[in-house]
Amino acid sequence: MGDRDHKAALSELEKKIAAAKAANAPAKKHQEEHYSQAQTGWRMVSELVAGLLIGFGMGYGLDYLLGTLPIFLVLMTLLGFAGGVKTMIITAREFNVEDANATKGDMPVDKADEDERT
């Protein structure tokens, strides 16, 4: 009877371990890609908004110090917008390179293509 109790306890322990592994399993691949794309989108939006706010703040500060209210405010806000767009483009290029590298490993390489590269 003692042997049966050990077997039952071991099978129960194996079920608990399997349940714990299933609970701690990594997310599915499509879920990871979705969150990655959402994070990329928010990063780009925050870069644009940060550029606008920095430009606005600098322009308002210069206008306040120099007594010329709308001139530097408009110019620096436009420069901040341009800087934010430029930063967004750089981020988009980074993620395009990462996507290209990720998909390159998934595609089968043809022997003829390898010979042309060398």
Image (spheres, rainbow, N blue to C red):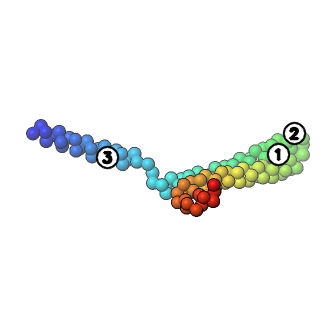
| Nearer mark to the viewer, of 3 and 1 | 3
The residue furthest top is 2
Amino acid at circle 2: Leu
Q: Secondary structure at mark 3?
A: helix
The x and y percentages for residue 48 are 71, 51
Tell me if mark 2 has few (under 14), some (14-19) or many (20+) residues whose alpha carbon lies within 10 angstroms of its own. few
Where is residue 112? Give x, y as percent: 58, 62
User: Residue at 84% across / 50% down in the picture?
Assistant: 75
Which quadrant does the N terminus fall into? top left
Name the amino acid, label 3. Ala
- In this view, which residue lies farthest toward the right? 67
Mark 3 lies on residue? 18
Residue 52 in view in this figure: no
Q: Which label number is shown at residue 65? A: 2
Residue positioned 78% across, 44% down in the render: 57
Assign a secondary structure to mark 2: helix
| Element type at mark 1 | helix
88 and 3: which one is in front?
3
Question: Which amino acid type corresponds to the residue marked 1 in the rendered image?
Answer: Gly
Residue 99 image position (x, y, % from top left): 59, 55
Q: Mark 2 or 1 closer to N-term?
A: 1
Q: Residues within 10 Å of mark 1 (few under 14, many from 20)?
A: many
Against 23, residue 100 (above or below) is below
In the picture of the structure, the residue carrying the numbered disc 1 is: 59
Quadrant hosting residue 66? top right
- Spatial separation of the CA atoms under disc 2 and disc 1: 10 Å
- Distance from the alpha carbon under mark 3 to that under mark 1: 60 Å
Label of residue 23 in the image: none
Q: Is the residue marked by circle 3 packed among few (<14), some (14-19), or many (20+) residues within 10 Å?
A: few
The reply to whether dot 2 and dot 1 touch (C-beta < 8 Å) is: no
